[in-house]
């Protein structure tokens, strides 16, 4: 037996959780919304919708995009976006450890 949980941040409804954090992390690594969406097996349209919804509810810009040009288009996280992703994964890691500790305390 093990404990399971889901974690997300809310601001006027569900705003930021594992899906959004993983999408932004993939965009940061791959430099493209399209490539990140493909790697996560979601559509480009869904990925773009997730980003816009989170940006709107959080009131911050998470992503900058660039179209065309010599090196083609791309996407990259804003400093606030990168900071949010980093904080979310650090927070999640601490929550996971706390839940594991509490589970061990009561069920081992």
Image (tube, grey):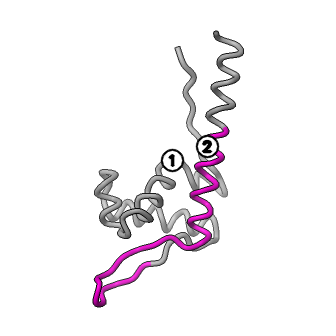
Q: Earlier in the sequence, mark 1 or mark 2?
A: 1
Q: Residue at x 34, y 64 (%)?
A: 45
The correct choice, above or below, for 87 with respect to 106 in the image is below
- In reply to whether residue 84 is colored magenta, the answer given is yes
User: What segment is highlighted magenta in the picture?
Assistant: 65-94
Quadrant of the rendered image containing residue 43: bottom left
Local SS, label 2: helix
- In reply to whether residue 107 is colored magenta, the answer given is no
Alpha carbon separation for disc pair 1 and 2: 9 Å
Q: Residues within 10 Å of mark 1 (few under 14, many from 20)?
A: some
Q: Residue at x 66, y 57 (%)?
A: 11
Q: Are marks 1 and 2 in contact (CB under 8 Å)?
A: yes
Quadrant of the rendered image containing residue 57: bottom right
The correct choice, above or below, for 104 with respect to 46 in the image is above
Identify residue for label 2.
Answer: 92
Q: Quadrant location of the C terminus?
A: top right
Identify residue for label 1.
Answer: 18
The correct choice, above or below, for 34 with respect to 16 in the image is below
Q: Nearer the viewer, residue 10 or 108?
A: 108
Give how far across and how far down residue 42 sits, in percent.
32, 54
Give how far across and how far down residue 46 sits, in percent.
37, 60
Local SS, label 1: helix
Q: Residue at x 59, y 41 (%)?
A: 7
Q: Residues within 10 Å of mark 2 (few under 14, many from 20)?
A: some
Number of numbered discs on residues: 2
Left or right, 94 with respect to 3, comes to right
**Which disc number belongs to residue 104?**
none
């Amino acid at each position: 037996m093990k404990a399971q949980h889901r974690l997300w941040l809310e601001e006027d409804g569900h705003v930021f959780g594992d899906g959004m954090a993983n999408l932004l992390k993939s965009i940061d690594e791959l430099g493209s919304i399209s490539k990140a969406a493909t790697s996560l097996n979601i559509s480009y349209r869904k990925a773009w919708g997730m980003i816009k919804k989170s940006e709107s509810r959080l009131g911050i810009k998470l992503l900058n995009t660039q179209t065309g040009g010599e090196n083609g288009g791309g996407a990259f996280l804003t400093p606030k976006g990168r900071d949010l992703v980093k904080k979310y994964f650090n927070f999640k890691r601490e929550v996971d450890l706390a839940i594991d500790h509490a589970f061990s305390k009561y069920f081992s």
